[in-house]
Image (tube, rainbow, N blue to C red):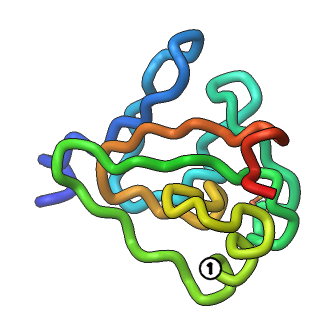
Amino acid sequence: MKDMQDAGCVVYFAPEYPPLRLPRGVNLSEHLTIENSPVLFGCRTGICGTCRSNVEALNGGRLDSPSEDEISLLSIICPGNPAARLACQINITADVKITPLRKDEYGL
Ligand code: FES
């Protein structure tokens, strides 16, 4: 019954993409597409780094912490960027703002 009352979470992007409301707990890579978001995906398993993005939880919400594998990859492809996440590894548990990282923003 609680799930029926949950309004889900909202994902905000750059202005040219309208916000998306998704069910709480779903994996972003299962719902974001090239048509509805600026986030690009490759492997969708946390290996390639294509989906690297700055991810900010909004409205006091929290996301699950990244796994050791995600932390390890981000330390290589986005060193020194504490906001970087692999979008494909996020199960959404809060409203978020997602900004894909361009190549010149990788931190390398
Ligand atoms: S799509 Fe490959 S790491 Fe996310």
Q: Quadrant of the C terminus?
A: bottom right
Residue at 27% x, 43% y is: 58
Residue at 69% x, 38% y is: 39
Q: Which residue is mark 1?
A: 71
Q: Quadrant of ligand 1?
A: bottom right
- Secondary structure beneath label 1: helix
Outermost residue toward the bottom?
68
Ligand 1 within 8 A of label 1's CB?
no
Q: Quadrant of residue 74?
A: bottom right
Q: Position of residue 81 (x, y in %)?
A: 58, 60
Residue at 65% x, 52% y is: 29
Q: Quadrant of the N terminus?
A: bottom left
Classify residue 9 as left or right of residue 68: left
Q: Amino acid at mark 1?
A: Ile
Q: Position of residue 49 (x, y in %)?
A: 80, 61
Circle 1 packing at 10 Å, graded few (<14), some (14-19), many (20+), is some
Q: Quadrant of residue 105?
A: top right
> 103 or 6, which lies in front?
103
Classify residue 18 as left or right of residue 30: left
- Is residue 99 placed above or below 66 in the rendered structure? above
Classify residue 80 as left or right of residue 73: left
> 79 or 71, which lies in front?
79
Residue at 52% x, 76% y is: 66
- Is residue 108 placed above or below 34 in the rendered structure? below
> 63 or 92, which lies in front?
63
Q: Position of residue 73 (x, y in %)?
A: 75, 76
Count up the numbered dots: 1
